[in-house]
Image (tube, rainbow, N blue to C red):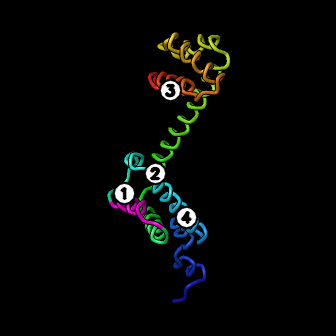
Amino acid sequence: MTKKIDDWHDDVPDNNANEEDDEIIWVSKSEIKRDAEALKDLGAEMVDLGNNSLDKLPLDEDLRAAINLAQKIKKEGRRRQMQLIGKMLRSRDVEPIQTALDKLKNRHNQQVSLFHKLEMLRDRLVEEGDDVIPSVLVLYPEADRQQLRALIRNAQKEKATNKPPKSYRQIFQYLRELAEGQD
């Protein structure tokens, strides 16, 4: 009983089919280190937050306790605690945490932008006086024209006599209250 060469070929399993199904994705050591460093940075960012902001993040009890501890520790112990937080994050899905953190940052950026706009509006009110009040009333219909006029006059007098800018600050406060009332 002799086999032909063609028959031997049929007995050998087809290795190419298995290789395509079990494709392995190789990750470099450098990439693993970069990912670990990014998680450590995320942990450091969370440690820098206050308790009110941390309450808005989807953190489990262990991770929250580790963050609270890191906030209390100084120097070398803090560095080691940050390492631990990074290690803890590796075993968790960080996508929801990152999304919530991005929302917190965005809210802060929006507030800073609003404050800059209100400061510019206040400066225009003090410089140009009553001419700007109609544009303020368009933005904030609930604004009190006479209160604004009195604050503007007082701010202009304070500026002219080099007194502390009490009314200047009150204009900003009033504009901020109007802006927050719209939300």
CA distance separating discs 2 and 3? 26 Å
Image coords of residue 135 (percent x, y): 60, 13
Q: Of label 2 and label 4, which has the lower sequence position?
A: 4
Magenta highlight on residue 63: yes
Magenta highlight on residue 94: no
Helix, strand or loop under label 3:
helix
Q: Is residue 37 above or below residue 154?
A: below
Observer-nearest residue: 91 or 69?
A: 69
Magenta stretch, main secondary structure class:
helix
- Select label 1 or label 3 by which is in front: 3
Q: Which mark is residue 49?
A: 2
In which quarter of the view is residue 150 placed?
Answer: top right
Residue type, mark 4 in image: Glu
CA distance separating discs 3 and 4? 42 Å
Q: Which mark is residue 173?
A: 3
Q: Is residue 43 above or below residue 150?
A: below
Q: Which mark is residue 64?
A: 1
Asked if labels 4 and 3 touch by Cβ distance under 8 angstroms, the answer is no
- Select label 4 or label 1 by which is in front: 1
Observer-nearest residue: 183 or 163?
A: 163
Residue 94 in the figure: left or right of residue 155: left
Image coords of residue 119 (percent x, y): 60, 28
- Mark 1 packing: few (<14 Cα in 10 Å), some, or many (20+)? some
Residue type, mark 1 in image: Arg
